[in-house]
Image (cartoon, rainbow, N blue to C red):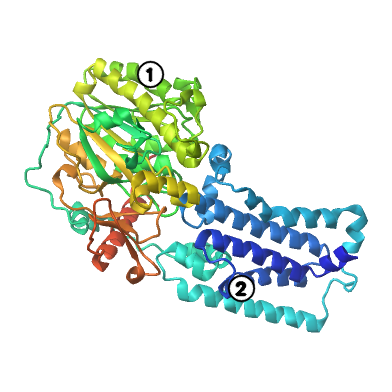
Amino acid sequence: MFWSKLLNRRFLLFTLLLLVKGSLVMYVVFDIGFSWETLVTELPFIWIVFCCIELIARKRKMLYYLLSDLLITLLYFTVVIYYKYYGVIVTYHALHQADKVTKVGESTYSLLDPYYLLFFIDIVILGAVHFWPKRKAASEPSFAPHWRPRPTRRMALYAMIAASIALCVFNIWPNRASMNENKQAEDMGILNYEVYTLLSDSTEKQDVVPMQDITQAKIDGLKGFREPASPKYFGAAKGKNLIILQMESFQDFLIGLKINGQEVTPNLNKLVQETFHYDRFYTMAGQGTTSDAEYVVNTSLYVPHHEAATDKYVEKALPSLPKLMHANGYDTATFHTNEVHFWNRSELYKSIGWDRYYDQKFYGDEDHIAFGSSDEILYAKTIPELQRMDRADKPFYAQVISMSAHHPYKIPESKYKMTLPENMEDTLVGNYIHAQNYADYALGAFIQDLKNTGLWDDSVILMYGDHQGLPIYSLSGDEKDMLKDMLGHEYGYPDMFRIPLIMHVPGLTYGAAQHDVGGQIDILPTVANLLGVSTANQIHFGEDLLNQSSNLLPMRHFLPTGSFITDESIFVPGKEYQDGTNFPLPGETETTPATDAQYERSLQLLNLADSFVSQLPNKDGSPNE
C-alpha cells in the first residue's frame, strides 16, 4: 500500500529526487548547494519534462518518469565527473570524447567518489519496485483509468508548462552575454545551460575575419610584440637537429622539490643548471589534452573552443613546424608508444605533415604502463632511430612523447624510486610524485644516451610539460594541504597551469632561470629563430621567447572564455571583465591588474585564429567550404 501511494504521486516524488541531485551538483561544482536559486533554475526544466509526460503518455507513465530521471541523472553525473578534471561544465561537444572513456577507464574511475553512486540509487530501487511482478499492477494509478487527464487538469498542466518555459527564458536571457561559461551555468541552471549551448551553437554565427585581414603584423600588434631588426640568436644552431620532448602531465613545481630530503626530479634538477629553463611557462592545451599540446606546439595556433583540435581541425592543411622544417631540408618524425588512432592522431599527423610516425606497432606493449610500453622502452627504442636519422645526409626534427606518468599515476610499485611519507601513499598527490619521479629516472637514461651517442651536442633539444597533472578540482582537502606544505603557499591556477620549458642549444652558455612569461604556442617561432628558419610567410600566434619582453596568452577550455595570462597574473573573468579575478604569477607580490584592453585583445586573438583555420584549404586539396 505504501509503495502504491508513493508511486502514484510520481510527479512530486521525482521532482523531489531530481531537486536533491541538482542541489548536490550545485554544491560540488559551485559550492552553493540547495537554495531558492536552485529551485528557480532547476525546477522549471524538470517540470516541463514531467508535464509533457502527463499530457502525452497514454500508459506506462512510470516508465517514462524513470527514463527521464535516468537521463537527467546521467547528465548531472557527467557534469560532476567532467568538472572534477577539466574545471568547466560539460556540454554536448564532449560527446566526441565518449569513445575515449573506455580507453582511459582507470583515469575516469579515479575521479569517482563512492557517494556519487547515490545519484542512481533511487532509479534502481524504484525500478525494481515498479517492475517486480507482484507490484506491477499496484504501480499504475487507480485514479486514472483513462489516459487523457480531465480538462481542468490538462489546463493546469499547460499553465505549468507555460510558467516553466517563462522561468527558463528568465534564467537564460539575462545571462547569455556572460563570457564565463561556469558563471553562465550557475546563473542559468545546469539543465538550462545545456539547452542554451545546444541552441546558441546552432544559431550563432562566427564573426569570421577575412583571410586577407589576418596578418602577422596584426597578430603581433595585438600581442604587443615587435620583431627586432636583428633577432638575438638567429641561426645560432643552424643546421642542427631538433628534438622536442613532450613530458606527460609534468608541472614546473616538481623541479627542485624535495620530500624528506629526496629529490623528486634529480635528473631535471641537474639539467636546468646547464640549459635555458623558463619557469613561468604555461600549458595551452584544451579538451584534447596531450594531443592538443602536440597541436599547439607544432602549429602555433590556439586550440578550438570546447573541442579537441583532433576533432575539429584535422581536415585542414595546417601550417606547421614539421612542414616548415621539411621545407628547409629536414627529415621529420614523431614517436609515441600509444596507438596512433587514439585522439585521431593518424589524421592530425597528416594535417601537420610529419614524414612518418612511430606508435604502438613499433614499440609493442613491453613493460606496460598506462596505455603502452613504459618510458624506459620508449627512450631505449627511440635512440637507435634517432641515430639512424642522424647518419643521413640531412638534419632531422623529432618529437618524442612520454606517457608513463599519465593520470591517475598508477605505476607498478617495482618502478618506485623514492619513499614517501605514509600519509601521501595511495593519494593522488603521492601517486603523482611516484609517477613523475619514475619519469625523471627514465628521462635521465635518455639524456645520457643522447650524450653518449653525440646527439646531445648536435641537436637543439626542448622539453616541456603537456598539461597540468594535478587539477585543483580533483584534490581533496588533505591533498591540498599536502601541496601547501610542499609549496609554502596555497596551490592555485598559477601553479596548476605552470609547466617547464627546458631548452638546450649547442654552443650557448646559460645563466639563471628565465622568468619571461611564455606558453606552448611560443615554441615554434623560438626554435625557428635558433635554427635560422624564417617564419615570415607562416602565420603564427606565438612569439620568439629569446626576443620578447612581454607576452599575452589567451586561455581556453580549462579556464572560462576571456581568461588570459599576462607578465604578472592569470586573469579569470566573472560574468564580464569588471568582476574578474587576477591570480599573481610566482614571484609577483604586487601586480598591476589586467586591463580591459588586454581582455579585448585576447578575444580578438582567439577569433583571428579561429577565422584563420576555418578558411584554410582541406588537406586533401579540396576547397574550403
- Residue 380 is tagged as 1
Please tell me whether residue 535 is drawn above or below residue 20 in the rendered image: above
Quadrant of the rendered image containing residue 67 = bottom right
Residue appearing at x 16%, y 42% in the figure: 546
Judge from the rendering whether residue 188 lies leftward or rightward of residue 381; answer left or right.
right
Outermost residue, left direction?
230
User: Foreground residue, 213 or 371?
Assistant: 371
Q: Give how far across and how far down residue 500 sits, in percent.
A: 29, 40
Q: Give how far across and how far down residue 368 sits, in percent.
A: 51, 24
Q: Secondary structure at mark 1?
A: helix
Which of marks 1 and 2 precedes in the sequence?
Answer: 2
- Residue 39 is tagged as 2
Please tell me whether residue 498 is drawn above or below residue 56 in the rendered image: above
Which of the image's four quarters has the N terminus?
bottom right
Q: Amino acid at mark 2?
A: Leu
Q: Is residue 458 visible?
A: yes
Q: Amino acid at mark 1?
A: Ala
Residue appearing at x 82%, y 53% in the figure: 128
Contact? badges 2 and 1 (CB < 8 Å): no
- Residue 62 is tagged as none
Residue appearing at x 79%, y 59% in the figure: 63
Q: Crowdedness of circle 2 by 10 Å Cα count: few (<14), some, many (20+)?
A: some
User: Foreground residue, 294 or 612?
Assistant: 294
